[in-house]
Image (cartoon, helix red, strand yellow):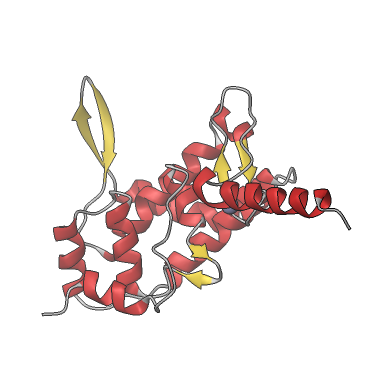
Amino acid sequence: METFEKAAAAERPAGVRELPIVTGHLALDFANTVDNRFDHLGTYPGLLHWAVRVDILTAAGARRLFETGPQSLRAAHALRAVLVEVFGGIADGQPRADAHWAGLRPFVTDSYRHCDLLPHRGSYVMSWPDDRPGAVLWPVARAAADLLTAPDLGRLKRCAGCPWVFLDRSRNGSRRWCSMEDCGTRAKMERYVTKRKASRPR
Ligand SMILES: [Zn+2]
């Protein structure tokens, strides 16, 4: 039987890399799912594969969802579009989250409508059922609402080398790239080449 893992791998053409997951924040990682113009959430198996990688779903849960049949990606893409607008705007110094709240609110209310409260280490965590199509979007929407009201929001930045956004958690606020291994390395290489060119005698 075909699994979602195989289907997700098949959707990715040769030469397209596995999506780097760079921010460690669900809402931002969800916004950063188009890489070099390739949409890693372009198919339902792709969405499930991403959800397993960021620990929203277990592999078994994703397999179960996959077997219940293909689901519409319209909601996932609508949520991503609003997160790209909201967090991109904030990173660019033009916050308009309130203007986009009408687009985001249905996802957030849906998230709270479906969540359970589980005791966890003397406190509680929110938890969502993993057997319904919304399972991937509920934790993402909740993470987005949390970030919008967190002091951390001021640390939101856009990568100097690509359109992705990230939280700069460095002590002196000096992080410039979504990932040092990727955009950071590329920028350093380009600087190195430019320097070498400049220092070459004519
Ligand atoms: Zn980048």
> Which residue extends farthest front?
201
Position in image of residue 35 (x %, y %): 51, 64
Apparent side of residue 141 relative to residue 5 in the rendered image (left or right) = right
Apparent side of residue 77 relative to residue 188 in the rendered image (left or right) = left
Q: Is residue 75 visible?
A: yes
The residue nearer to you, when weighing 1 against 65, is 1
Q: Residue at x 57, y 48 (%)?
A: 185
Q: Residue at x 43, y 55 (%)?
A: 20
> Which residue extends farthest left?
1
> Which residue extends farthest right?
202
Give the quadrant of residue 122. top left
Position in image of residue 113 (x %, y %): 34, 49
Apparent side of residue 114 relative to residue 164 in the rendered image (left or right) = left
Looking at the picture, does residue 61 appear above or below residue 108? below
Q: Residue at x 57, y 58 (%)?
A: 82
Apparent side of residue 100 relative to residue 112 in the rendered image (left or right) = right
The residue nearer to you, when weighing 131 against 178, is 178
In which quadrant is the N terminus drawn?
bottom left
Q: Is residue 159 visible?
A: no
Looking at the picture, does residue 87 appear above or below residue 44? above
In which quadrant is the C terminus drawn?
bottom right
